[in-house]
């Protein structure tokens, strides 16, 4: 018997095309259901992205869009072809009794107060990541959701990404053996600053650069990837050390322009994380190193699986799509099943998928209608916030931060 999952089990786990068919079946059913009336609060870059997904969904009716910045608000209404009512005050939007659910994509410091107000107003809530500015706020959000009986979904969209889902099962089934180290990075070469038409809008537009509103690279980028690490490893860190500073962009920002961290996980596993704004080499990625192989995710829609030279052959290996990288064979991990196609029709069927943002919006609306539990609840999202806040403490104080198990629990 060859190591790892059987070929049948692999094809079952990796048959993402079947998931796409199920998604299509749900979409078809949704067309005959009453649409969920949705309001979007916060219509900047991410809010507009989510708004476009909602407009494309057959079971959504966007009836309201809110932003204090008029340019964003006007653009949001345009995206809905004028069908949504524009609001400058989110509380006025919440007073609209017709709205059943809201999508919140505002600066981090507003996540908790807006979510709590929305839940208490009787709305279901999708809130972007990181879940909140502080652990206490995240817990308050979860408690109010429980008290009101409303859905609260957090926007760690990789939980809805078929490439990540497939990678998760490969690790869970032992394809790369015992994971000992993880390397994670998000590198870019730009100031991360947005153009401001008038200085009075500086903090409104560049909120990510100021500590009153955000924890910078940690909450806006690292939280995404540490959420993936915790999910894939099925574990939580015990401690973290880190460095960071405002070492290059001397432009009045208050958050670090680079961070480097090492997390210790149980069993001697270590996770190394870096985020830069001065060099884009290597870009974005997550590398999971095991004693039988390495799984590399360097794109949200594709990854690579390398086997160690002394690892026994997998039963399904000959059926897998593969490429040569630096003289080594790598199995391609992509949204389609990780194997060769039997016919063109099968390829087209599995390729008929939507992006992860679309999928998470679709599932949010399904949860609103059916009461189903989202893939990323407040309890699921809290550990990523705990990780980055512990790292922030370690960086700011120059100490090792030891996590307490209760910090990860709602």
Image (spheres, rainbow, N blue to C red):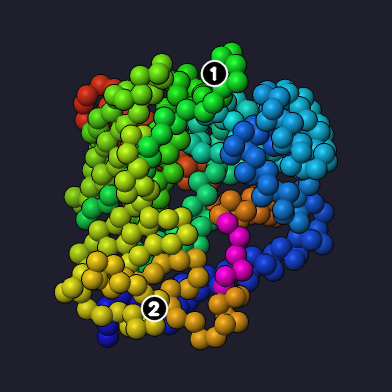
x then y, percent, for residue 322: 36, 74
Q: Residues within 10 Å of mark 2 (few under 14, many from 20)?
A: some
Q: Earlier in the sequence, mark 1 or mark 2?
A: 1
Q: Secondary structure at mark 2?
A: loop
In front: label 1 or label 2: 1
x then y, percent, for residue 110: 57, 26
Residue 236 in view of the camera? no
Q: Secondary structure at mark 1?
A: helix
Work out whether 101 lies above or below 374: above
x then y, percent, for residue 158: 49, 52
The residue under the point 67% across, 67% down is: 24
Disc on res. 103: none
Left or right relative to 269: residue 360: right
Magenta segment, prevailing SS (helix, strand or loop): loop
Magenta-tinted stretch: 350-355
Q: Are marks 1 and 2 in contact (CB under 8 Å)?
A: no
Disc on res. 320: 2
Considering depth in this image, is 208 or 226 the residue closer to the camera?
208
The residue under the point 45% across, 20% down is: 210
Work out whether 238 lies above or below 160: above
Q: Quadrant of residue 114?
A: top right
Work out whether 376 lies above or below 290: above
For residue 178: magenta? no
Quarter of the N terminus within the rendering: bottom left
Considering depth in this image, is 61 or 306 the residue closer to the camera?
306
Q: Residues within 10 Å of mark 1 (few under 14, many from 20)?
A: some
Q: Quadrant of residue 224?
A: top left
Residue 67 in view of the camera? yes
Work out whether 72 lies above or below 279: above
Residue that sits furthest to the top in the current view: 200
Left or right relative to 124: residue 131: left
Q: Which residue is mark 1?
A: 202
């Amino acid at each position: 018997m060859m190591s790892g999952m059987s070929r049948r089990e692999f094809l079952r786990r990796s048959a993402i095309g079947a998931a796409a068919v199920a998604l299509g079946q749900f979409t078809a059913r949704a067309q005959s259901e009453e649409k969920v009336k949705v309001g979007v609060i916060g219509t900047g870059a991410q809010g507009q992205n989510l708004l476009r997904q909602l407009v494309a969904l057959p079971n959504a009716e966007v009836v309201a869009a809110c932003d204090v910045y008029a340019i964003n608000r006007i653009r949001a209404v345009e995206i809905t072809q004028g069908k949504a009512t524009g609001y400058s005050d989110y509380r006025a939007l919440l007073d609209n009794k017709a709205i059943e659910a809201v999508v919140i994509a505002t600066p981090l410091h507003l996540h908790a107060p807006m979510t709590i107000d929305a839940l208490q107003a009787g709305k279901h809530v999708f809130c972007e990541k990181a879940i909140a500015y502080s652990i206490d706020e995240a817990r308050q959000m979860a408690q109010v959701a429980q008290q009101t009986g409303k859905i609260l979904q957090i926007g760690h969209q990789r939980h809805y990404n078929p490439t990540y889902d497939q990678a998760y099962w490969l690790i869970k089934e032992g394809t790369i053996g015992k994971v000992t180290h993880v390397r994670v990075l998000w590198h870019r070469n730009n100031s991360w600053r947005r153009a401001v038409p008038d200085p009075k809008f500086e903090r409104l537009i560049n909120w990510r650069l100021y500590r009153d509103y955000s924890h910078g690279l940690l909450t806006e980028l690292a939280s995404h990837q540490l959420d993936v690490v915790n999910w894939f490893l099925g574990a939580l860190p015990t401690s973290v050390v880190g460095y960071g500073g405002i070492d290059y962009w001397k432009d009045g920002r208050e958050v670090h322009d680079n961070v480097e961290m090492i997390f210790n996980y149980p069993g001697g596993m270590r996770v190394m994380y870096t985020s830069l704004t001065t060099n884009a080499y290597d870009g974005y990625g997550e590398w999971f190193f095991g004693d039988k192989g390495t799984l590399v995710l360097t794109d949200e829609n594709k990854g690579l699986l390398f086997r160690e030279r002394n690892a026994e052959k997998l039963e399904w290996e000959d059926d897998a799509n593969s490429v040569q990288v630096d003289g080594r064979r790598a199995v391609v991990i992509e949204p389609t099943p990780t194997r060769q196609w039997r016919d063109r029709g099968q390829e087209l069927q599995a390729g008929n998928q939507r992006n992860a943002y679309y999928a998470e919006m679709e599932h949010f609306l399904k949860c609103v209608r059916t009461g189903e539990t989202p893939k990323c609840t407040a309890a699921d999202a809290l550990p990523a916030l705990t990780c980055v806040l512990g790292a922030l403490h370690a960086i700011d104080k120059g100490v090792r931060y030891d996590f307490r198990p209760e910090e990860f629990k709602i």
